[in-house]
Image: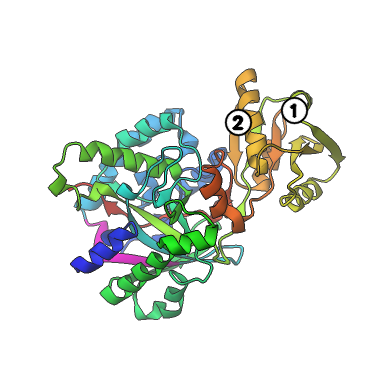
Amino acid sequence: MFLLKDKLGKVGLHASSMLLPADNVDMTKWAVIACDQYTSDPEYWEDVEKIVGSSPSTLKLFLPEVWLETPREKKIRGSVLREMKAYLRFGTLKEIESGFIYTKRTTAYGNVRNGLMACVDLEQYSFETGTDTLIRPTEKTIVERIPPRVRIREKAPLELPHILFLIDDPKKTVIEPLERTRNLYKKLYDFELMKNGGRIEGYHISEEPAISAIANAIAELASPEAFAEKYDDDKAPMLYAVGDGNHSLASAKQHWENVKSELSLNNNEDHPARYALVEIVNIHDEGMNFEPIHRVLFDCDMDGLVKAMESRLDVKTAEYTDANELASFVEAEYENKESHTFGLVSGERLLAVSVMNPEFNLAVATLQTFLDEFIADNDIEIDFIHDLKSTLALSKDGNTGLLLPPIDKSGFFRTIIEEGTLPRKAFSMGHADEKRFYLEARKIIE
């Protein structure tokens, strides 16, 4: 087992025990979508509360971001730690032996996504700009967002992950073989997720030969020779890109640094805070779709926004009469390198805006760079919306929505390696209701 541990360590992984709900827990009520979804839709979360009722649920173990800076925030924060301790004390959670979990998620859209739940070594990760670690962020970390999260984590006995990692495995050697052999492993769960979430299956990978095979396949991806051939780059290899949960992982890293400072070198290798539980997904998985994250500017006049764009950028505009046609045009333009196109929506007004000769490779970088300055100058509130329908619903009554094109995932890793982190909220791994649900847990205190 020591040799296996060493093999996993070289690719930034750790086989850890995990926690799942006891057999008598209603799994559909237990699993709840990640806290950073539907942040402008309190009705979604109110409906979740009705579905859960008094049943055990991950809803009681986190703070949905929709309630930030509302009277409900303090009340929920005060109850989360109590609920975690109660679930541990009274047997709501059961421990499974060390290993991984192969997950099969079938979404309401018919997409099937294969994943691997595993612990990653935070020593192999940095959120600093220009990092050359095995694990790299995909968006710039806003350091001001880390301390509040660390304060929660340092007191919490549990972590419930919604972090998604990406690997660049075009030959499908790591995760996809588990789909073919899944019936050899113990099935841990298989149930319908609430509110259009689809279905999730989980299989326990605890046998040493199976874990070793996964480690060997990942090691092939991480070899300097394979990295140099794939990306024509002689830099230190990058193995994992943080797809979702960049700030959650950064907070786990900072917490570990704080804990590590109090430990001796001999005591830090197996400390649970050194690791974070994530789901690893192959970027080439057919069920892994990159969706754009749209923007809504509140109390923002479209004419003023367009005038500001014209004063700072070389833009062309075109009027539209149908929102779906506008969205289709924006999507069709995502590969255009000579211009970056996005849509503006405010009530009945629809406008396509193309920025000519853009400075950046990605349309989201062109737009967000402008918006950061525009928002600061005009003291405007912005929200990031994960689906078209919600964006259009919010883009009225004086608000202006901005429709963005998707990102081409085939060149995603190369962009991160060559250019570093993307602008915040540059992309979404699937629609909002395809995001990861809180389900598994892990102890992060000794």
Query: Tag 2: Cα neighbours inside 10 Å, few (<14), some, or many (≥20)?
Result: some
Residue 125 in picture, x, y percent from top left? 36, 47
Task: Answer with the quarter of the image where residue 350 lies.
Answer: top right
Kindly indicate the quadrant of the structure image that contains residue 232. Answer: bottom right
Q: Residue furthest front?
A: 234
* Residue marked by disc 1: 309
Kindly identify the residue that appears in the image at 51 percent across and 47 percent down. 47
Q: CA distance from mark 2 to mark 1?
A: 17 Å
Q: Residue 140 at what x, y percent from top left? A: 49, 38
In the depicted view, which residue is nearer to us: 11 or 156?
11
At 66% from the left and 50% from the top, the residue drawn is 406
Callout in the foreground (2, 1): 1
- Look at the image and say whether residue 102 sits in the magenta stretch: yes
Q: Quadrant of the N terminus?
A: bottom left
Whether residue 158 is in magenta: the answer is: no
Q: Secondary structure at mark 1?
A: helix
* Secondary structure category for the residue under label 2: strand
What residue span does the magenta drawing correspond to?
91-103
Question: Residue at label 2?
Answer: 382
Dot 1 alpha-carbon crowd within 10 angstroms: few under 14, some 14 to 19, many 20 or more:
some
Q: Tags 2 and 1 in contact by the CB under 8 Å rule?
A: no
User: Which amino acid does the dot numbered 2 rest on?
Assistant: Ile
Left/right of residue 405 with respect to residue 235 in the rendered view? right
The numbered disc on residue 331 is: none
Q: Earlier in the sequence, mark 2 or mark 1?
A: 1
Of 264 and 22, nearer the camera is 264
